[in-house]
Amino acid sequence: MRPFHALIPAVLAVTLDGTLSLQAAQPTSIAEQDKLIGTWQLNVAKSRFRPGPGPISETRTYRRGPKGVEGTIQRRFQDGRSERIEYIAEFDREYPVAGTEAYDHVLLKRVDAYTAEAVLSHAGRVYGTARRVIAQNGNTMTITFRRENAPEATINNVSIYEKVQP
């Protein structure tokens, strides 16, 4: 049996005088580990939509529910259309998406603590891919969406979001 102190994660730290010390790592909550959780507002001026036009506003809300991350995307377009897209998902499994005719499933893959990739599909065929990167400070999120098989032209959007502070 291992002693109790061996069960506590530890990190090596360099002290101010240059010596090494062994310190217990501080446990973090799920909310601290997952910087995605919260409300994000699209910064239209910093975003790029090619070929465009993109939405005139978008709010993304993510919360941790009992079955996974619950995502809600609310967006409005210049022509008056609006969408409310909803899903519940975890990594490495395909989940249904409601609220848009463009795609009906999402498959998420975690790349690292700040990066995730998604494959969006409709009726079993890939619709497009997205890469989400959250800044290390947790205040900015960039989603790069690409769709190469679009009927009109390749779509390459870069959306910049800012976290709404509670």
Image (cartoon, rainbow, N blue to C red):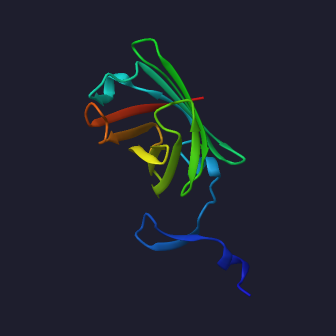
Could you tell me which quadrant the C terminus lies in? top right
Q: Image quarter for residue 63?
A: top right
| 67 over 20 or under it: above or below | above
Relative to the observer, which residue lies in front, 102 or 157? 102
| 88 over 100 or under it: above or below | below
Q: Is residue 164 visible?
A: no
Q: Does residue 17 appear to the left or right of 94 in the view shown? A: left
The image shows residue 44 at horizontal and vertical percentages of: 37, 23
Q: Image quarter for residue 3?
A: bottom right
Q: Residue furthest bottom?
A: 1
| 55 over 149 or under it: above or below | above
The image shows residue 136 at horizontal and vertical percentages of: 43, 47
Relative to the observer, which residue lies in front, 24 or 106? 106
Write the residue at 50% across / 43% down: 123
Relative to the observer, which residue lies in front, 160 or 117? 117
Could you tell me which quadrant the N terminus lies in? bottom right
Write the residue at 45% across / 43% down: 137
The image shows residue 17 at horizontal and vertical percentages of: 42, 67
